[in-house]
Image (spheres, rainbow, N blue to C red):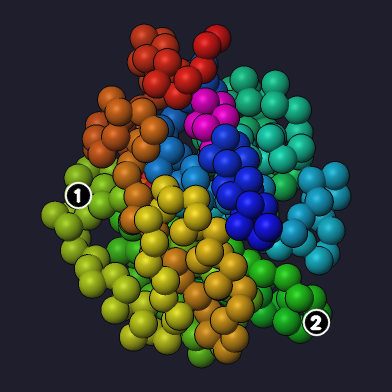
Amino acid sequence: MTTLIQSRDIIFLKEQARKIRIAILKMLTKAGSGHTGGSLSATDIVTALYFYKMRHKPWEPEWPERDRFILSKGHAAPLLYAVLAYSGYFDPSLLNTLRKLNSPLQGHPSSKLLKGVEVSTGSLGQGLSVANGIALGLRLSKINARVYCLLGDGEIQEGQIWEAAMTASHYSLDNVCAIVDLNDLQIDGRCSEVMKIEPVTKKWEAFGWHVLQIDGHNMGEIVEALDESERIKIKPTVIVAKTIKGKGVSIFEDKVEYHGIAPTIEELEAALRELGEDG
Ligand SMILES: Cc1ncc(C[n+]2csc(CCOP(=O)(O)OP(=O)(O)O)c2C)c(N)n1
Ligand SMILES: [Mg+2]
C-alpha cells in the first residue's frame, strides 16, 4: 500500500517537474535572456522540495512555521518563479513578465519584490550563511521548521560557503539542509578545469556534515534523501546531487554555452516537442 502511494507521488512529481521545465523554457524565451542550464539542472530537486517536502502555505507566505528555501544560486531564478507560481503564490501569467522593467520577477530573485522569495540572491556564496542565521533564529523561537539551501557546484568555490559549513556544524544546525547541484559546469567551463572542487563529499564530511550522494534527476532518490535529512539529528545534512546542466532538453544538456542564454523560438519549439508539450 505504502509503495503504491509512494510510486503515485513519484509519478505526480515527475509530471510537475516536466511542467516546471516547460514554464522555465517559455518564460526564458519570452524574456530573451536568462539562465537556462542551471534552472533545468535543479528542476527535479526544487520541484520535490515545493511539491513534496516543504511545509508551506502559498496563501500565507509569511506563516512563521513554514520551511524556508533559499536559492543561493540565484541565477536559477526562472526555476524559483515557476515553482512559486505553480504552488499558488501568484498567477502563472506573471511568468510572462520575467526580466521586464517593473516586474517583480527580475533576473535574480528579490524578497522585496515577490512574496515567497525568502532571501534576495544572485551574488554567489552567501545563501548558506543566511540559512544558518534563519536556522538559529528558528531554534531560538522554538519553531520546528527547516531551512533548505540550494548551492551551485561552481558556487562552492566561494570561501564563504566553507565558513558557513563550519558554522552550521559548530552550532549543530540539524534544521539546515544544503543541496549541491553538482553539474560540473560553471559560467565558463568545467568546475574540474576552472577550480577543482573534488572531493566534494569528503570536504563536507570533514566539516562535520551528514552527507548524502544522489542522482539529482531520480525523483525517488531525491525524495528519500530529503526524508533522511529530516531524520538526522545534531548534524546539518548536505545532499550532493549529481545533475546534468540543461537536463531534459538534449540540445542544452551538458553545454556550457547554455549557462546564461535563453532559447531561441526554434530551440523552444524543439524543446517543447522533446518534453511532450503540444502547444
Ligand atoms: C559572487 C559572484 N561572482 C560571480 C557571479 C557570476 N556568475 C553567475 S552564475 C556563475 C556560475 C555559477 O556556476 P554554478 O554555481 O556551478 O551554477 P550552475 O552550474 O548551477 O548554473 C557565475 C560565476 C555571481 N553571480 N556572483
Ligand atoms: Mg554548476
Dot 1 falls on a residue whose secondary structure is: strand
Instruction: Say which residue appears at 43% left-offset and 38% top-offset.
Output: 40
Q: Position of residue 69 (x, y in %)?
A: 62, 57
Q: Does residue 1 appear in this view?
A: yes
User: Which numbered marker is on residue 168?
Assistant: none
Dot 2 falls on a residue whose secondary structure is: loop
Instruction: Say which residue appears at 81% left-offset and 80% top-offset.
Output: 141
| Residue 22 covered by magenta stretch | yes
Residue 143, compared with residue 109, is above or below; it is below
The magenta span reads 17-23
Hey, what amino acid is under mark 2?
Lys
Is 178 left or right of 158, judged from the image as shown?
Answer: right
Q: Position of residue 11 (x, y in %)?
A: 57, 41
Q: Position of residue 102 (x, y in %)?
A: 67, 26
Quarter holding residue 230 = bottom right
Residue 271, compared with residue 34, is above or below; it is above
Quadrant occupied by the C terminus: top right
Q: Position of residue 187 (x, y in %)?
A: 28, 43
| Residue 10 covered by magenta stretch | no
Name the chief secondary structure element in magenta: helix
Question: Label 1 vs label 2: CA separation?
Answer: 42 Å
Q: Which badge, 1 or 2, comes first in the chain's sequence?
A: 2
How many neighbours does mark 1 have within 10 angstroms: few (below 14), some (14-19), or many (20 or more)? some
Residue behind mark 2: 142
User: Which numbered marker is on residue 190?
Assistant: 1
In the foreground, 59 or 195: 59
